[in-house]
Image: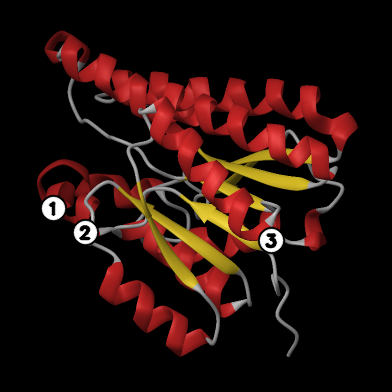
Amino acid sequence: MSKILEGKICLVTGSNRGIGRAIVERFAEEGAIVYANARKVGSLDEWALACSTKYNTQVIPLYFDVVDNAASKQAILQIKSENQRLDVLVNNAGLVTYELLSMINFDSLREMFEVNVIGTIQLIQLASRLMTRQKSGSIINMSSIVGDKGVKGQLAYSATKGAVISVTKSAAKELASSNVRVNAIAPGMVGTDRLLEVFEKSFKDRLSDIGMGRLAKPEEIANACVFLGSDLSEYVTGQILGVDGGTIL
């Protein structure tokens, strides 16, 4: 079978666990050269080498904090220097909190906006400068079903993910004339280690709200990223793709 991301240069932020790690693996499986981002230096080295060998491509660790504009700029410049292009950016890095309105910690809220929103906008700005010159590119932002529908007990988190939806739609309109596509994925509940840690205590009763009756697998979110990153979606921009198994909130 042909690999639909063969030769594409991709950057995936927040690759150290969960959805981000699954996206890197699926991109590599489809033939992409993938820069895998995390904050902690050395944390991805062993895994990246194993992925490179397994999928016969390059998975390259790239360590920086997405809220650090200078470090993000240096990362994009490194990709440009080494490849002269960037085809796909996945803004996956993010923070999540679970608390009622009355219990919101505003320091945590500000930090979450820095990572989930400002970090995303910074990387869109930096990547789009390269993509507009090459007249091609796909930017994929990670939102959430709660950013669209809202949910009790996650007002702060849903506010950041709602902002990501607005950012996606506006950036798509601005960059379309340069053939740069901007879309977002809005997952429902995904069975990552992070969610499973709190699932039994806080979310077990929500299984009945999911039409398919189960949590998503990280690989199912990654599959949507493969579609949006590939030429199969070359006429798709400004869209929010729900991957939620028929969830009703």
Q: Secondary structure at mark 1?
A: helix
- At x 38%, y 42%, the residue is 93
Q: Nearer the viewer, mark 1 or mark 3?
A: 3
**Residue 118: image location, x then y, percent:** 44, 21
Q: Nearer the viewer, residue 44 or 85?
A: 85
- At x 63%, y 29%, the residue is 168
Q: Give the left or right position of residue 97, taking residue 50 as reference.
A: left
Asked if marks 1 and 2 touch (Cβ < 8 Å), the reply is yes
Q: Is residue 174 above or below residue 35?
A: above
Question: Distance from label 1 to label 2 (Cα)?
Answer: 6 Å
Crowd around label 2: few <14 · some 14–19 · many ≥20 (10 Å): few
**Residue 30: image location, x then y, percent:** 62, 76
Residue 237 falls in which quadrant of the image? top right
> In the picture, which quadrant includes the C terminus?
top left
Residue 177 falls in which quadrant of the image? top right
What is the three-letter code of the residue carrying label 1? Glu
**Residue 246: image location, x then y, percent:** 53, 50
Residue at mark 2: 193
Crowd around label 3: few <14 · some 14–19 · many ≥20 (10 Å): some
> In the picture, which quadrant includes the N terminus?
bottom right
**Residue 116: image location, x then y, percent:** 40, 29
What is the three-letter code of the residue carrying label 2? Asp
**Mark before the other along the chain sequence, 1 or 3:** 1
Q: Give the left or right position of residue 50, taking residue 28 as reference.
A: left
Residue at mark 1: 197
- Asked if one can make out residue 230 in the rendered structure from this viewpoint, the answer is yes
Residue at mark 3: 227
Q: Is residue 227 above or below residue 200?
A: below
> What colour scheme does the image use?
secondary structure
